[in-house]
Amino acid sequence: MNRLESKTAVITGAANGIGYAAASLMAQEGARVLLADYDEHQCATAAESIRAAGGSAVATTVDVTDEDSLAAMIEEAAAFGGPHVLCNHVGGSNPERDGDLLNMDMAEWDRVMTLNVRSTVVASRNAIPHMIAAGGGSIINTASIGGLAGDAIQCAYGAAKAAVINLSRYIATQYGPRGVRCNAVAPGAIMTPSLRNHLPAETLDAIRWHISLGEVGEPSDIANAMLYLASEEARYVTGQCLVVDGGTSSQSAFAPGRRAG
């Protein structure tokens, strides 16, 4: 407990799913958490839930595709002594428009790069000076195992998450001497509301078949990884991509069939 005592953490996409799980956990560990999300009502409800559980949390509305909105988010955190931790968690793409290279909508490519990569750049650029002034900090960027291997669809998403992974290494290299650590977390299949509500049971069963541990992860699995990277327990960890996927990306393509046999 109290691994983040006296720290201020900013988490984008914190109204539900992984972002909310991370906000709740960091608040339990003593952080004052700024939950930032595009959905004003849901974000306010999430912050109230954390306060009701005894944590310190405030909500703010942010559009991560807008530079002024991101700057205002960081300044709000600075008003109460932060940020010491920044989780750039917002991301994603529309699979109906983000297909294979020949069929991908180029407008979706631009949107995905802004949503996933440019937002991470802008938020980090605004947060790093405050972290340096405070003697250091931790930036945690949400990537994906989609950024580590190829796929049949979501070309833009995979390229964007690969960029997030290497951007994290660049930030770590450039600002490590000034006390700022930067790492990425690459989730596999996680049972977020979006996954639960949009994938049929047979698709989830097929996903489980390709996971070494045999189950889809929970938001808390990623939140725990984020907490570790935010804490002093990870004081000597920077420039890394922590893969949290139940073993999905570590096994050969033949393993599921051989295991089933």
Image (cartoon, grey):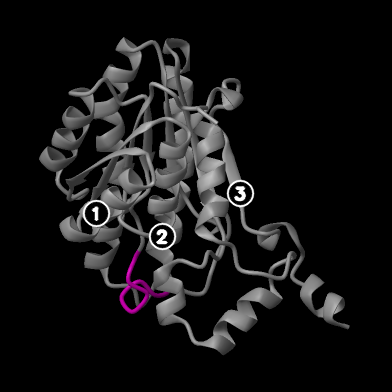
Marker disc for residue 17: 2
Marker disc for residue 43: 1
Whole-angstrom CA distance, mark 2 to mark 1, is 11 Å
Estimate the x, y position of residue 137 in percent, counting from the top left.
41, 22
Does 58 sit above or below residue 243?
A: above
The image quadrant that residue 93 belongs to is bottom left
Q: Which residue is mark 3?
A: 243
CB within 8 Å, label 2 to label 1: no
Q: Earlier in the sequence, mark 1 or mark 3?
A: 1
Q: Earlier in the sequence, mark 2 or mark 1?
A: 2
| Residue at 53% in and 50% down | 222
Of helix, strand and loop, which one carries label 3?
A: strand
* Magenta residue span: 93-100
Q: Quadrant of the C terminus?
A: bottom right
Q: Is residue 167 visible?
A: no
| Circle 3: residue type | Val
Estimate the x, y position of residue 42 in percent, counting from the top left.
23, 60
| Circle 2: residue type | Gly
Q: Quadrant of the N terminus?
A: top right
